[in-house]
Amino acid sequence: MQRVNQILRRLPVWVVYVSGVLPAPWLFYQGLTGGLGVDPIEALEHQYGELALQLLIAVLAISPLRRFFGLNLLKFRRALGVLTFTYVALHLLVWLVLDVQVPSQIWADIVKRPYVTVGMAAFVLMLPLAVTSNNFSVRKLGPRWRSLQRLVFPAAILGGLHYVMLAKGFQVEPLVYLFVIIGLLMLRVPFPSLLTRLRQADSA
């Protein structure tokens, strides 16, 4: 693992940005040329949303990987976070511009459709994270910056829940995403602290 970490230290962060953003134009091109099936708009919306969840899971996995396996990916966390928001924004733009199209219908969908409400709530929580993903904000906010970054936890749960609610009928894949997100969040709880809480719950 030490050797792997040495290799990762030499890897420039821009490589993560470039490799992470490449699927976006490729998928859009696929949609334009018929490569995404009979409903390219829905497929493109789904692909961008799923990539956002995958990147979000990668962000959440960084701390557990370091804690349990010694794999240090901290230098890439900001890049992965920015890429996550990029795909969330693309997912939202496809829905707004290509799917709904009617401005008056947008607010109606947010209010009336629970899965849209949950998805928009996740997006709103991620906005301050994206805005403050820069060195200036880190210096300006100081210790408050770390507290602000914890918004990613409820945003991740809402994002996973949005996918489950969006699925038509019973589908395993959205549930797997949600359980992985919850599992990664639970791994962030210090083990002694978790045991103490479980014992307190049993004795109550």
Image (cartoon, rainbow, N blue to C red):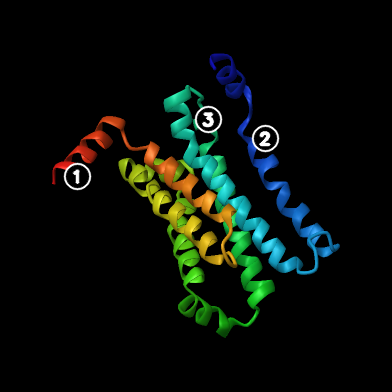
| Residue positioned 71% across, 61% down in the render | 44
Q: Earlier in the sequence, mark 2 or mark 3?
A: 2
Could you tell me which residue is drawn at 17 percent across and 41 percent down?
Answer: 200
Specify few, some or many for label 3: CA neighbours under 10 Å numbering under 14, 14-19, or 20 or more: some
Q: Which percent across, then down, holds residue 6? A: 58, 17
Which numbered marker is on residue 66?
A: none
Compare marks 3 and 1 and give the one earlier in the sequence.
3
Of helix, strand and loop, which one carries label 3?
Answer: loop
Residue located farthest toward the top when viewing the structure as drawn: 3
Q: Is residue 133 visible?
A: no
Classify mark 1: helix, strand or loop: helix
Tell which circle, 1 or 2, labels the residue nearer the N-terminal end.
2
Is residue 67 shown to the viewer in this render? yes
Q: Amino acid at mark 2?
A: Val
* Location of mark 3 (residue): 73
Question: Label 1 belongs to which residue?
Answer: 201
- Give the amino acid at mark 3: Leu
Q: The residue under label 1 is which amino acid type? A: Ala
**Which of the two residues, 143 or 58, is positioned nearer the viewer here?**
58
Q: Is residue 201 above or below residue 162?
A: above
Q: How many other residues sit within 10 Å of disc 1, few (<14), some (14-19) or many (≥20)?
A: few
Distance CA(mark 2)–CA(mark 3): 13 Å
The correct choice, above or below, for 48 with respect to 139 in the image is below
Comparing labels 2 and 3, the label whose residue is closer to the camera: 3
**Residue at point 47%, 59% (across, down):** 161
Q: Position of residue 111 (x, y in %)?
A: 46, 78
Residue sitting at the far left: 204
